[in-house]
Image (spheres, grey):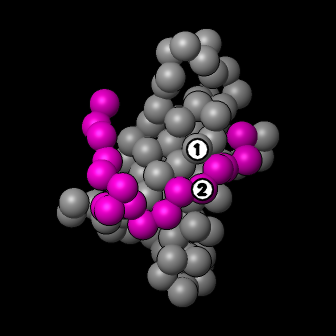
């Protein structure tokens, strides 16, 4: 598990763990950060949607503190099982 210095964090958000397609929230977040349209971004649905959906729909016990890390559009995402998401530059 990686650690992130607070100065490297671009934003922290909480994703809606009940949303049917959680990867959509990731694309919307990047579009907001980049001031772009979601349709201008690389497709993400087939990349991490199932992983996020599994993390949210069948989460392990909270003591597991499970998280998923991935890069998308130049950003590094760390998504915890409760939806807490930390975004940093992928190069950091």
Q: How packed is label 2: few (under 14 Cα within 10 Å), some, or many (20 or more)?
A: few
Q: Where 13 falls versus 54 (above or below)?
A: below
Q: Quadrant of residue 28?
A: bottom right
* Residue 92 image point, x, y percent: 22, 60
Q: Is residue 32 magenta?
A: no
* Residue 19 image point, x, y percent: 77, 46
Tag 2, which secondary structure?
strand
Q: Earlier in the sequence, mark 1 or mark 2?
A: 2
Residue at (49% x, 63% y) in the render: 11
Task: Compute the Cα span from label 1 to label 2.
Answer: 6 Å
* Residue 43 image point, x, y percent: 50, 64
Residue at (30% x, 52% y) in the render: 5
Tag 1, which secondary structure?
strand
**Which residue is label 1 attached to?**
84
Q: Where 36 falls versus 59 (above or below)?
A: below
* Residue 74 image point, x, y percent: 33, 67
Q: Are marks 1 and 2 in contact (CB under 8 Å)?
A: yes
From which residue to which does the magenta span run? 1-17
Q: Is residue 16 magenta?
A: yes
Q: Is residue 66 left or right of residue 14?
A: left
Q: Residue furthest front?
A: 6
**Which residue is label 2 attached to?**
13
């Amino acid at each position: 598990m990686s650690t992130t210095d607070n100065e490297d964090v671009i934003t922290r958000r909480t994703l809606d763990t009940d949303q049917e397609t959680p990867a959509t929230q990731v694309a919307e977040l990047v579009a907001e950060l980049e001031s772009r349209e979601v349709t201008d971004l690389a497709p993400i649905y087939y990349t991490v949607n199932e992983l996020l959906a599994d993390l949210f729909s069948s989460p392990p016990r909270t003591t597991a503190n499970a998280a998923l890390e991935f890069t998308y559009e130049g950003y590094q995402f760390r998504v915890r099982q409760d939806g807490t998401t930390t975004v940093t530059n992928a190069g950091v």
